[in-house]
Image (cartoon, grey):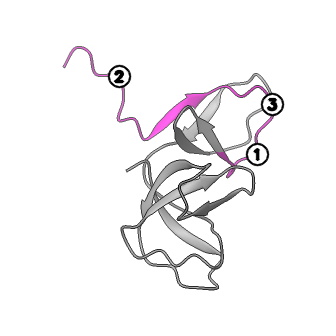
Amino acid sequence: MKNFIQEGAVLDYSPAGAVAGGAVVVMGVRVGVVVADIPAGGLGAVRVKGVVELAKVAADTPAQGALLYWDAANSRLTTTAAGSVLAGYAAKAAGNGATTVWLHLNA
């Protein structure tokens, strides 16, 4: 195919400020996870597809397949859509008290 560019699981990203590897960044109405530290104004890789483990609201109990949203103000995933960006869905269930969840990115 002449117009194929890439698989699209990892995209180039240039942040205004420095971003640490593993941090979540919001790109428009999507999220990505920074692969390695990116300096301010530099160019780096951000994973936008795949499954990653991220912090979640401990009281949320997403079932496998439940939609998850990125709460940028608190740097964690939540099942509450209001004020947050859709991040994907729970790749496996996470119970009450669990502080992390497996997220299937942007799916």
Q: CA distance from mark 2 to mark 3?
A: 27 Å
Name the residue carrying label 2: 5
Q: Nearer the viewer, residue 55 or 21?
A: 55
In this rendering, the answer to whether 45 lies above or below 101 is above
Q: Residue at x 18, y 20 (%)?
A: 1
Which mark identifies residue 20? 1
Considering only order in the chain, which callout, 1 or 2, is on the residue closer to the N terminus?
2
Percent of width and height locating residue 104: 43, 58
Please tell me in which quadrant of the rendered image residue 55 appears. bottom right
Q: Three-letter amino acid code at disc 3? A: Gly
Which structural element holds mark 2?
loop
In this orientation, which residue lies closer to the viewer: 48 or 96? 96
Determine which quarter of the picture holds residue 67: bottom left
Question: What is the magenta segment's predominant secondary structure?
Answer: loop
> Outermost residue, bottom direction?
96
Q: Which residue is mark 3?
A: 17
Q: Which segment did they paint magenta? A: 1-24
Seen at 53% across and 84% down, the residue is: 95
Label 3: few (<14), some (14–19) or many (≥20) C-alpha neighbours in 10 Å: few
